[in-house]
Amino acid sequence: MSTKNLTSLFRPESVAVIGASNKEGRLGNLVMHNLLEAGFDGPIMPVNPKRQAVVDVLAYPDIGALPVVPDLAIICTPPAPVPGLIATLGKRGTGAAIVLTAGLHRVETDDGRTVKEAMLAEARKSGLRILGPNCLGLMVPGIRLNASFAHAQAHPGRISFASQSGAMCTAVLDWAREHEIGFSHFISLGDCADVDFGDTVDFLATNPGTTAILLYIEAVQDGRKFMSAFRAAARNKPVLVIKSGRVAEGAEAAASHTGALAGSDNVYDSAIRRAGILRVDDIDELFAAVETLARAKRMRGGRLAVMTNGGGIGVMAVDRLIAEGGHLAELSPETISQLDDVLPDTWSRANPVDIIGDAPGQRYSEALGILGAAKEIDAVLVMHAPTATASSTGAAAAVIEAVHGLRANVLTSWVGGEAVAPARKLFRDAGLPTYDTPGQAVAAFMHMTIISATKKR
Amino acid sequence: MSTKNLTSLFRPESVAVIGASNKEGRLGNLVMHNLLEAGFDGPIMPVNPKRQAVVDVLAYPDIGALPVVPDLAIICTPPAPVPGLIATLGKRGTGAAIVLTAGLHRVETDDGRTVKEAMLAEARKSGLRILGPNCLGLMVPGIRLNASFAHAQAHPGRISFASQSGAMCTAVLDWAREHEIGFSHFISLGDCADVDFGDTVDFLATNPGTTAILLYIEAVQDGRKFMSAFRAAARNKPVLVIKSGRVAEGAEAAASHTGALAGSDNVYDSAIRRAGILRVDDIDELFAAVETLARAKRMRGGRLAVMTNGGGIGVMAVDRLIAEGGHLAELSPETISQLDDVLPDTWSRANPVDIIGDAPGQRYSEALGILGAAKEIDAVLVMHAPTATASSTGAAAAVIEAVHGLRANVLTSWVGGEAVAPARKLFRDAGLPTYDTPGQAVAAFMHMTIISATKKR
């Protein structure tokens, strides 16, 4: 298949909206609003046979009347006309279409094929590529393209996310906006009738704006293509997969949802692992992974130091670390002696480093300076629980100050709710990875360790 | 030991603060402020030999000068004077003391004992009970008692929480405030020199204001007492335990933190399970459990229906449910036919019930009405991912409206960030349990199932 036409999909210079509408709540109206709000640089051309303008933009009665051949067409019509539209677009030279319409496999054409089959046959004639059908669309914030009917815009960033589930798209998008995390590409694949995970990963693997690839997979149609694309991509950059349908009941639900066979989970699991790809299990872990990929530096190794103002949360972090197969750094006598100079007598003198409940910002920054420079430590997880004797926000500010120039990677977890919210915001603004709980922070550390080890091979 | 004196600790009618201070940041100052701010009904009597008033309250030079024998004394002095203070308090008839002071086992008396040993010997003479030392103190919001130096007040509620770790106390407290969850008792046990988990659970098991008991345990000294108290309590009300030190490295950290032997995890695990107590593994799960215990109704059985506007998040919930050993309800033909009447043709016609991405509030309420009344269903997990075609907040309002009088338990999970925040707030205000992710919601459902099953035995 032609790479040129994937470029028409992911880097279009002109866009037509077939079935653009003035009626609020209609897909053709939501997409027009999203396109205009995002501020795409090329022409946005609505096609509507009955209206002279859609959302204040001059409309064209049909594809033939378009003054410019659109690189990308977004189709928001009912199922029946879709094959004819794809044929006309292909003949005019359009490279790609996003088909938002659902239910194409349930509607028949006059010759007894499904509308979906007829659409694919037409696309094959011209080489036009199709994203969808039954998808939410596509966002490329770097070129201000929001060709979707999502409820909100993605911020620009360096992670590319592709998902078979529209709900996972909007949930991740909504979470990422709250956490001020941006995306390079935000892709709803829908039914994957043409463009699939293999194509998408192929494109993203060599895309310089994408530093990490994140995928939500329910089922894969072409296993060989999937594997070769994934293996190649994982050599270039981190690839994280959340594959649902882990159990038979889930797989059944996934199959009824996408109409594709979800396949045996074991097959996927070993294939994913062989390709050097990290698999995460649930949405909490996915959110933690997004935070990590957006903000964390590449890891040097797997030895973690845990620094905390409360023993209990330190123990919880160690429990999780060891359960996941991670390694607690063993402090050298030099490091212990340096810490003796800055910490109260009652400090733990071991890892986890308990800097005691009344730790003010200065103690956080001094201890972090020592741990972050120690050669036996690859990463430091700095933790905090609220106290009345020292400021949670002040401790965060001190950590942000101390982090510059450190040898080790630094992750943070300010555990609580109300009192730690301003500190979490400070970390986000400073671009320092932060996690709500020790468990999430340790999961993220393990992701980074696995990703970094994979890339070294 | 006398139950009367545990009542002095948990239901005092008068309080003295030994070592009360006007110096900001000192324990004796923080405690005075917390006591006054909470609005305790009885006298709060500061003891300070050098000041006539502490935080505007008339101070007494020593215990002998107190006009009323305090039921409870809070000790904020350095270690050395503690044994003498306990002796004097015991002689005057005080029933209990909270010793906030840390490091008592590191300071020696003239006769070569540690201050901790001397303190316990004095307490034994009079039967005075001691909470701590090295603890954060105690809150009983129902009687407006905040005898702690925590950074914030607990809201009144029905859960009692006791923890060996002060950091876990403040982290849970801070989280609970954000989630508007209250407590019957909030107890920081510290070093457990005298009052331990056994005593605490004994008291809480028969306390009518406590509907559920939640414990963070690092190590237990008296295994037999612990087990008999726990077994008795678990017969009366749900008991949830988060036991850290699951792995050797964590246990070591816990031991160095509390100074007690953390013991083999396997021993605890089987003991906890034999007592009919639910063990949770990390702070995320603990938070989910707090939400459940505060808001969820007792469960009838273990068959869950999942209802969602997005297939993907439904599959994630099923994956987790089956992985945790839970059961997906099988919809009866009657239920399917009733749903056919209110849902679009494309609905999943199976559990998980996919009510389709454009589902407005009315569709949520109609489908929930049917599922919540079906005899094959014990609980319904209602889920939502943001869409542009329907309001997340409107869907939540419709669910809250529909939930009244339903046979089944209802749990909710509005997945995302910004766009779902108002819906989550609505659920909290309505007292309906809500969880950030499908994984947390399913974990909570499993907790409820296990707890309800345990209580039936």
Image: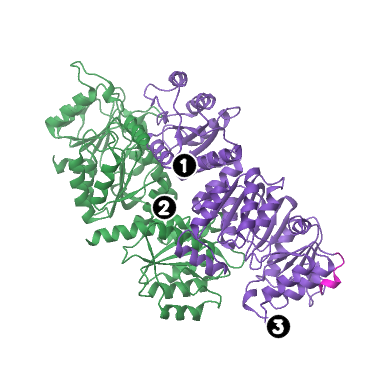
Chain colours: A purple, B green
Name the one closer to the observer, B122 or B382.
B382
Residue type of the residue flagged with mark 1: Ala
The mark lying in front, picked from 3 and 2, is: 3
Q: Residue B180: which disc?
A: 2
Q: CA distance from mark 2 to mark 1?
A: 14 Å
Quarter of image, res A356: top left
- Residue A65 within the segment the image draws in magenta: yes
Residue type of the residue flagged with mark 2: Glu
Q: CA distance from mark 3 to mark 2?
A: 61 Å
Name the one closer to the observer, A289 or B51.
A289
- Identify the residue under disc 1: A419
> Does residue B341 lie above or below A359 as drawn?
below
- Identify the residue under disc 3: A111
* Disc 3: CA contacts within 10 A as few (<14), some (14-19) or many (>=20): few
Quarter of image, res A350: top left
* Disc 2: CA contacts within 10 A as few (<14), some (14-19) or many (>=20): some
Which type of secondary structure does the marked residue at label 2 adopt? Answer: loop
> Does residue A275 lie above or below A31 as drawn?
above
What percent of the width, then of the height, locates residue B160? 30, 49
Highlighted magenta segment, given as a residue range: A62-68
- Residue B311 within the segment the image draws in magenta: no
Chain designation of label 3: A
Question: Residue at the bottom extreme?
Answer: A110
